[in-house]
Amino acid sequence: MPDLGLDVLLKGNNFFRLLEGLLAAVKISMVSIALSIPFGVLLGITMTGKNILVRFLTKLYLEFIRIMPQLVLLFLVFFGSTRSLGWNLEGETAAVIVFVLWGTAEMGDLVRSALTSIPKHQYESSRALGLAKRQTYFYIILPQTLRRLLPLSINLVTRMVKTTSLVLMIGVVEVLKAGQQMIEANRMNSPNAAFGIYLVIFILYFLVCWPVSMAARRLEKKWG
Amino acid sequence: MVLDNLSLEVKKGEVVVIVGPSGCGKSTLLRCINGLEPIQSGSIETDGQAGMVFQSYELFPHLSVLKNMMLAPLKVQKREKKEVKKEAMELLKRVGLEEKADSYPQQLSGGQKQRVAIVRALILHPEILLFDEVTAALDPEMVREVLDVVLDLARQKRTMLVVTHEMQFARAVADRIVFIDEGKIIEEASSEEFFEHPKTDRAKRFLNVFRY
């Protein structure tokens, strides 16, 4: 067995620090997701509206967020807000703002496409059976939309969890940053630690995202 | 304008079949009666609810066959669940699908879906049934099983307004044939008279297409 430098993890409270970093990452992503879902649903419904100006503005917002690399958005909010607005945002706060902006845009587009993918005939046959507009939405359109939405939004959730690794660039000590600190600190006495620690981080990310994907797959099967 | 100065009366227990070239306004007529298409002028009077069966079945994919049937009776007519379920099962049995009660639409063949769509309309006890080219999307070998159900309903003296391209079937099921072209009624006659002795040239030309 090659030396993976795993002993570094056992030094002091290193493993605990790694978990703490993971917690920071999970916290940022969970708060962002919890906010992005309701905002995204509202945005998605807005995007299916008839008003051309509203549709143009929401589309512009979506494209802007999509085109911008998340890292640029992070720098823009974290450093930009300090320089131009004089705000002194915490790294975590800046991260949540960026992730909510991004998550809302992506979620909004998913909701929009799920809503518009329900065939017109579904509305019609529901109406032909005498269901009122609200009943049609509640019993026919919404359940089908949710089913289409689920796999796509789970994909977004795991993407958001993974992308939290960028927030180390604005000084948040999340799991990757904690790992880097340990590797740096032990460069002399345990030069192989980089391998072992990144392996552990890999496993930690996997342990967070895998159950989410599994739950989604199970639901998908049940609803398929 | 799709329909122009069109007047049509269907008596209780009568089966009226509407035929005519594609795009003549047949389907629009049904959709107007059912309120799916707005009318600019004129009026539509029915003694009660109209039940409609579409060309593409339009079952609700997220609900089982039984739930597809029970949704409207429970939520619109506010009927009692036990009674609705009993009637749903009886109807399914009548069209030979009682084993499919808990299946989902994607597990059914086209013909089976269309039979479910028919009983889903029937369970609401509509005064009149509207059939909009119910066999047009089906594989040929499944057309029969659906038409048999419609024929059976005609024998029970259900009031029906049927749009179809199946001339043999139209002849078998209709009390009266209404021939429409360009949004107008061109000819109206009993089934036999229309097919044996069409009066107008347009009807003759139309029927000729179906003879080889």
Image (cartoon, rainbow, N blue to C red):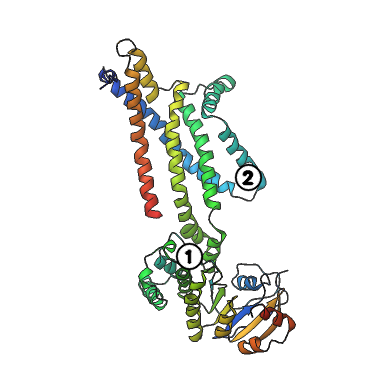
Tag 2: amino acid: Arg
Q: What residue did someone put label 1 on?
A: B59
Quarter of the C terminus of chain A within the rendering: bottom left
Front residue (pair B142, A85) = B142
Residue B25 point in image, percent of width and height: 67, 72
Residue drawn at the location 68% of the way across and 80% of the way down: B208
- Chain on which label 1 sits: B
Residue B47 point in image, percent of width and height: 56, 80
Question: Is label 2 or label 1 in front?
Answer: 1
Q: Is residue B103 left or right of residue B57?
A: left
Q: In this picture, is B201 found above or below A6?
A: below
Q: In this picture, is B133 found above or below A17?
A: below
Residue drawn at the location 47% of the way across and 48% of the way down: A149
Residue drawn at the location 26% of the way across and 18% of the way down: A7
Q: What residue did someone put label 2 on?
A: A55
Q: Is residue B74 visible in the rendered structure shown here?
A: no
Front residue (pair B169, A93) = B169
Tag 1: amino acid: Leu
Residue A128 point in image, percent of width and height: 54, 68
